[in-house]
Amino acid sequence: MVKNMMPYYLSRMGLTVIIGIFLFATGSSIWISILISVLLLALFIWAPHSGRYSVHPEFGITALRRDEFTEVINDKAARNAFVVSMLVLAAITVYFGYAGLILIPASVLKWTLAFGVLTYYGTDLWMRKS
Amino acid sequence: MMNLRNNLKEIRLQKTLTQENLALKVGVTRQTIIAIEQAKFVPSVRLALEITAALCMPFESLFWLEESQGGNNG
């Protein structure tokens, strides 16, 4: 199994090295770059054992595939995340409208993204657990 | 309303297959097999046929339609 998955592991190792170099080149400290690369590599190693993907070693570097149950979960999670993001955006717009402010600070708009991401992973976890 | 029911768990156990074994045979995740067994996920026709083929059983002995009892699960 491990031998069959070598193309997957080697490609992900290469990817994490590239990301580490990119982070270092764009101003991150060497230790932060290494830490993020190692964490990313750990995620890649864990992924085939996570039960979230069907494993097909015959596909080489794209050995991990989503099956139809996972696709259903991802579709619902994405839909929920979109709806929540739009509702948060609408609430922020209405709030700032009432407050008489024309410009909405970018720091506030980040909440839209944060709520969307939280909803996505929350839905994903909830659907897998229930 | 008709719901899709199955006795995948019973047939799988008769064949002494684990959820992991069956998932590998069919090419899906173990979570998918669990979700089908617990009637939380209705598989596509293709996947249902792949499961019946993997278990060497006729389709209708694994999956059937049943009148719902007021719920909409399944």
Image (cartoon, rainbow, N blue to C red):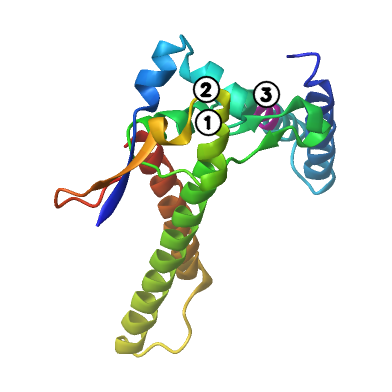
Q: Check if residue A95 falls in the magenta segment.
A: no
Chain letter of mark 2 equals: B
Query: Tag 3: residue type?
Result: Ile
Residue B4 versus residue A66: which sits nearer the camera? Answer: B4
Residue B41 versus residue A3: which sits nearer the camera? Answer: B41
Secondary structure, mark 1, is: helix
Foreground mark, 3 or 1?
A: 1
CA gap, disc 3 and disc 1: 28 Å
Secondary structure, mark 3, is: helix
Q: Quadrant of the N terminus of chain A?
A: top right
Question: Are there few (<14), some (14-19), or many (20+) residues within 10 Å of tag 3?
Answer: some
> Quadrant location of residue A31?
top right
Q: Quadrant of the C terminus of chain A?
A: top left
Q: Which residue is mark 2?
A: B55
Query: Tag 1: residue type?
Result: Ile
Contact flag, marks 1 and 2 (Cβ < 8 Å)? yes
> Quadrant location of residue A55?
top right
Q: Which residue is mark 1?
A: B51
Foreground mark, 2 or 3?
A: 2
CA gap, disc 1 and disc 2: 6 Å
> What residue is rendered at 82% in x and 44% in y?
A22
Asked if residue A26 is positioned above or below residue B47 in the image, the reply reads: below
Place of residue B34 in the rendered image (x, y in percent of width and height, measured from the top left):
41, 29
Q: Which residues are magenta?
A: A39-45
> What residue is rendered at 39% in x and 65% in y?
A84
Place of residue A36 in the rendered image (x, y in percent of width and height, measured from the top left):
68, 34
